[in-house]
Image (cartoon, grey):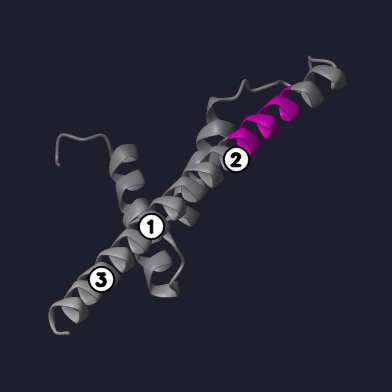
């Protein structure tokens, strides 16, 4: 840990604090992931110098960054939906097995 740059240690410390706060507040993990993703997109987006570039280029850059964030939110939403469907599938399979087992038990004890 001593060989890591000071900025990286600051990021790790901040990450730990954020993780702790979110867990104490009872927020889901996806809140933290969305915050990371949002600021990663803003960090990766082209930094436009508003003094030398035109207003149209600045607005276009902000629009593209916002669009990427919306795409990411939609992707997370779809993944959450697929996970929810998988949970329903597992629950219905479990209930069907229990129903068949209890029906088999009832038939044997006739």
Q: Residues within 10 Å of mark 2 (few under 14, many from 20)?
A: few
Q: Residues within 10 Å of mark 1 (few under 14, many from 20)?
A: few
Q: Residue extending furthest bottom?
A: 110
Q: Tell me if residue 93 comes above or below residue 95 in the rendering.
A: above
Q: Nearer the viewer, residue 103 or 94?
A: 103
Quadrant of res 4: top left
Q: Is residue 2 magenta?
A: no
The x and y percentages for residue 16 are 32, 56
Tell me the magenta residue range: 61-71
Is disc 1 placed on a helix, strand or loop? helix
Is 8 placed left or right of 56 in the picture? left
Q: Tell me if residue 110 comes above or below residue 72 in the rendering.
A: below
The x and y percentages for residue 76 are 51, 43
Q: Is residue 63 magenta?
A: yes
Is disc 2 placed on a helix, strand or loop? helix
Is 73 placed left or right of 53 in the picture? left
Q: Tell me if residue 2 comes above or below residue 100 in the rendering.
A: above
**Disc 3 or disc 1, which is closer to the eye?**
3
Residue at x 79% of width, y 15% of height: 53
**Disc 3 or disc 2, which is closer to the eye?**
3
Please name the predominant secondary structure of the magenta segment in the image. helix
Q: Report, in whole angstroms, how far the alpha carbon at label 1 lies from the one at label 2.
A: 20 Å
The residue at which mark 3 appears reads as 98
The residue at which mark 1 appears reads as 87
Is 47 placed left or right of 57 in the picture? left
Sequence-wise, the earlier of marks 3 and 1 is 1
């Amino acid at each position: 840990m001593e060989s890591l740059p000071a900025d990286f240690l600051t990021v790790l410390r901040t990450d730990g604090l954020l993780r702790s706060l979110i867990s104490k507040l009872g927020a889901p993990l996806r809140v933290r992931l969305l915050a990371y993703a949002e600021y990663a997109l803003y960090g990766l987006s082209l930094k436009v110098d508003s003094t030398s570039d035109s207003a149209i280029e600045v607005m276009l850059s902000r629009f593209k960054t916002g669009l990427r964030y919306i795409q990411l939110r939609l992707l997370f939403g779809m993944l959450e939906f697929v996970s929810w469907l998988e949970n329903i599938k597992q629950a219905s399979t479990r209930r069907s097995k229990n129903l068949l087992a209890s029906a088999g038990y009832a038939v044997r004890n006739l």
